[in-house]
Image (tube, rainbow, N blue to C red):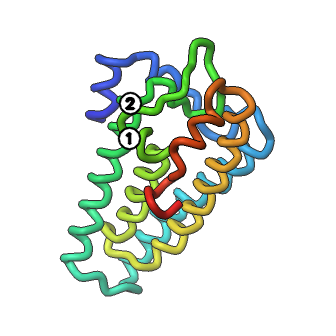
Amino acid sequence: MAITQYFLEHDRALIVRRMNAGPAAEREPRQKLILTFASVSMCAIFVVSSLDHRRAWSAVPTAAVLVGAGLIVFGFAVIFQAFRDNSFAASTIQVDSGQKVIDTGLYARMRHPMYGGALVMFAGIPIALASWWGLVPAVLLGVAIVWRLTDEERFLARNLAGYEAYRGRVSARLVPGVW
């Protein structure tokens, strides 16, 4: 809520771009499929983690739960900074008029910091909920995020002036030095 409030006050256009979200909002059939898979995986993180915690399938130490909570906070912080760096971060894959390649801030080190922050946050959620089994749908969500961003990159290379050159300058998609 704090992030939303911040952007309502400082970048309302970002909020407007983020309001139309989910599989139904996407124009491309492949993106509809990807977001459906991602949505099911995201819900499964909470369902599996809750069942795991309730039925005590996992023995997660308190220290790990705290690390999971820290991952959630860190993931939100990365997402917040990515939004601050890139007002064009829409919920759907699109290119708006006047949009330019953002290559400063987090975008100077990795091409998809918002997705990177989301991966960290969604890895932390099941751990914070004291569930090792919740990591299984978190991995599936990670697959969906990688699938989405590779498809998004093809779209941006075709439709956003300067994106191909940006890919040449910034090689890391999600994890600098790794991928």
Residue 101 placement (x, y as % from top left): 54, 27
Whether the residues at callouts 2 and 1 have beta carbons within 8 Å, the answer is yes
Residue at 66 percent across and 42 percent down: it is 153
Residue at 62 percent across and 33 percent down: it is 163
Q: Give the Cα distance between marks 2 and 1.
A: 7 Å
Residue 36 placement (x, y as % from top left): 67, 50
The residue that mark 2 highlights is 85
Q: Is residue 119 left or right of residue 151?
A: left
Task: Locate residue 97: give its quadrant.
Answer: top right
Is 164 located above or below residue 56 in the figure? above
Labels 2 and 1: the sequence-earlier one: 2
- The answer to whether any part of residue 163 appears in the image is yes
Is 85 located above or below residue 10 in the figure? below
Q: Which of 149 and 173 lies nearest the eye of the viewer?
A: 173
Which mark is on residue 106? 1
Q: Which of 47 and 42 lies nearest the eye of the viewer?
A: 42
User: How crowded is the residue under tag 1: few (<14 C-alpha within 10 Å), some, or many (20+)?
Assistant: many
Q: Quadrant of the N terminus?
A: top left
Residue 99 placement (x, y as % from top left): 57, 19
What's the amino acid at mark 1?
Answer: Leu
- The answer to whether any part of residue 18 appears in the image is no
Q: Which of 135 and 105 lies nearest the eye of the viewer?
A: 105
User: How crowded is the residue under tag 2: few (<14 C-alpha within 10 Å), some, or many (20+)?
Assistant: some
Residue at 59 percent across and 43 percent down: it is 168
Question: Which residue lies most toward the right here?
Answer: 29
What's the amino acid at mark 2?
Answer: Asp
Task: Locate residue 145: give its quadrant.
Answer: bottom right
Is 73 located above or below residue 138 in the figure? above
Q: Is residue 24 left or right of residue 132?
A: right
Q: Callout 2: helix, strand or loop?
A: helix
Q: Callout 1: helix, strand or loop?
A: helix
Q: Which of 110 and 168 lies nearest the eye of the viewer?
A: 168
